[in-house]
Image (spheres, rainbow, N blue to C red):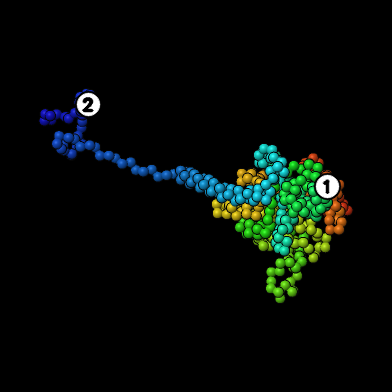
């Protein structure tokens, strides 16, 4: 290159595409006939805006929520699978006795039979499998309404193959299948039961403790008889029984179980065994609603299996989720509380003709009506809302 002549850029490929002068940076001499490259200019990093940070944080929380929900559901499904196996082991023909669910439980009415067992009071009768609590739960998702039908365990009915007996004996004679057959005869096929759930009250104590206790509204003061004394022999000699004040109160597993087992109220001679069934139902309902809380969701990956340990049922894990959503959306002010009844006769309850009308109230075929005035302690009827019998 001649002295004083400007250098030209030569493109790759062997031939120059035009002669473009290449200016050399001032103060930087050529080396070996080459011009040094211009230094790279580093651009400063842009800091994340608060909007972007919040968006990333929300995305991470959502991912964590999904992972936690999946882990909790898998753990819960494992417990439900064992509950299904327990039912099939003891009642292999239960599927034929149940009426098939019409569509999804979350969007269609469903009828669930709830049976409560309490073996703690029958330690010397190991083979005793009587149902201490019998209740029907009917869901109506379209109207966000629930209906509870309480059936006194001393109600005398015709048990297929066993004649006239107390209805709680049907569980002893033939398990939940025979209970379903007995209910069909009692209601004239007006109630088609889609699912069954058996609750073991002896394991309910641990479940209630696991969910942090439950809140129960006691309708009237209670002083029980002397059972399960919490003291030693000297203390039990002067102990008068378990006390429960009127009003809403928090109960741990032991106290809730005691409340559900009370058979005698020394403060109210009219408090009968039918009230005991209602107390058991209030404990079961409070526990079911507590299971739907956020605190239970947080514990699901760790306690999912233990939460359903007291249950024996045909409901699947997904149906449990649907049932939980239906119960969560239901309005307490429109909840229907009904019971069958009749007249007391020698320790049994002889059914009343009004029981058929109560069935129609539960299924929505007629408006709910309270028990007839003067019908006695066991008069059948319905109430709407939180009012007690």
Name the secondary structure under disc 2: loop
The residue at which mark 2 appears reads as 13
Q: Residue at x 71, y 60 (%)?
A: 126
Mark 2 or mark 1, which has the lower sequence index? 2
Q: Quadrant for the N terminus, please.
A: top left
Label 1: few (<14), some (14–19) or many (≥20) C-alpha neighbours in 10 Å: some
Q: Position of residue 182 (x, y in %)?
A: 78, 47
User: For this view, does 81 lie left or right of residue 337?
Assistant: left
Residue 136 in percent (x, y) is at 74, 48
Query: Where's residue 233, x and y in %?
Result: 71, 74
Q: Residue at x 78, y 44 (%)?
A: 184
Q: Which mark is residue 30?
A: none
In the displayed orientation, state which residue is furthest to the front. Answer: 161
Tell me if residue 153 comes above or below residue 54 in the rendering.
below
Q: Quadrant of the C terminus?
A: bottom right
- According to the picture, the residue beneath numbered tag 1 turns out to be 355
Where is residue 169? Give x, y as percent.
Answer: 77, 54
Residue drawn at the location 83% of the way across and 51% of the way down: 164
| Residue under the image location 80 percent in, 45 percent down | 185
Camera-side residue: 383 or 155? 155
């Amino acid at each position: 290159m001649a002295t004083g002549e400007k250098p030209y850029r030569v493109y790759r490929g062997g031939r120059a595409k035009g002669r473009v002068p290449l200016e050399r940076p001032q103060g930087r001499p050529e080396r070996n006939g080459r011009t040094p490259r211009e230094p790279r200019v580093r651009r400063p990093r842009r800091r994340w805006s608060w909007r972007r940070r919040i968006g990333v944080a929300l995305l991470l929380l959502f991912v964590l929520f999904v992972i936690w929900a999946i882990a909790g559901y898998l753990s819960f499904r494992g417990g439900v699978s064992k509950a299904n196996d327990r039912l099939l082991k003891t009642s292999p023909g239960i599927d034929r006795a149940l009426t098939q669910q019409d569509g999804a439980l979350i969007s269609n009415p469903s009828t669930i039979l709830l049976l409560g067992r309490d073996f703690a009071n029958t330690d010397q009768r190991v083979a005793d499998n009587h149902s201490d609590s019998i209740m029907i739960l009917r869901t109506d998702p379209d109207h966000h309404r629930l209906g509870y039908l309480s059936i006194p365990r001393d109600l005398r009915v015709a048990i297929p193959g066993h004649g006239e007996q107390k209805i709680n004996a049907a569980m002893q004679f033939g398990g939940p299948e025979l209970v379903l057959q007995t209910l069909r005869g009692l209601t004239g096929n007006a109630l088609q039961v889609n699912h069954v759930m058996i609750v073991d009250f002896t394991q309910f104590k641990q479940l209630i403790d696991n969910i942090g206790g439950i809140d129960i509204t006691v309708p009237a003061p209670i002083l029980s008889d002397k059972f399960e004394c919490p003291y030693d022999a000297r203390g039990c000699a002067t102990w008068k029984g378990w006390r429960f004040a009127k009003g809403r109160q928090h109960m741990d597993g032991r106290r809730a179980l005691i409340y559900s087992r009370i058979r005698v109220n020394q403060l109210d001679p009219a408090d009968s065994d039918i009230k005991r069934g209602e107390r058991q139902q209030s404990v079961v309902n409070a526990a079911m609603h507590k299971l739907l809380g956020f605190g239970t969701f947080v514990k699901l990956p760790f306690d999912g299996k233990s939460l359903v340990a007291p249950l024996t049922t045909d409901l699947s894990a997904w149906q449990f989720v649907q049932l939980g959503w239906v119960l969560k959306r239901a309005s307490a002010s429109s909840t229907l509380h009904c019971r069958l009844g009749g007249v007391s006769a020698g320790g049994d309850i002889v059914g009343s003709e009004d029981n058929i009308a109560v069935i129609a109230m539960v299924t929505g075929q007629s408006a709910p009506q309270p028990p007839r005035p003067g019908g006695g302690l066991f008069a059948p009827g319905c109430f709407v809302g939180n009012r007690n019998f």
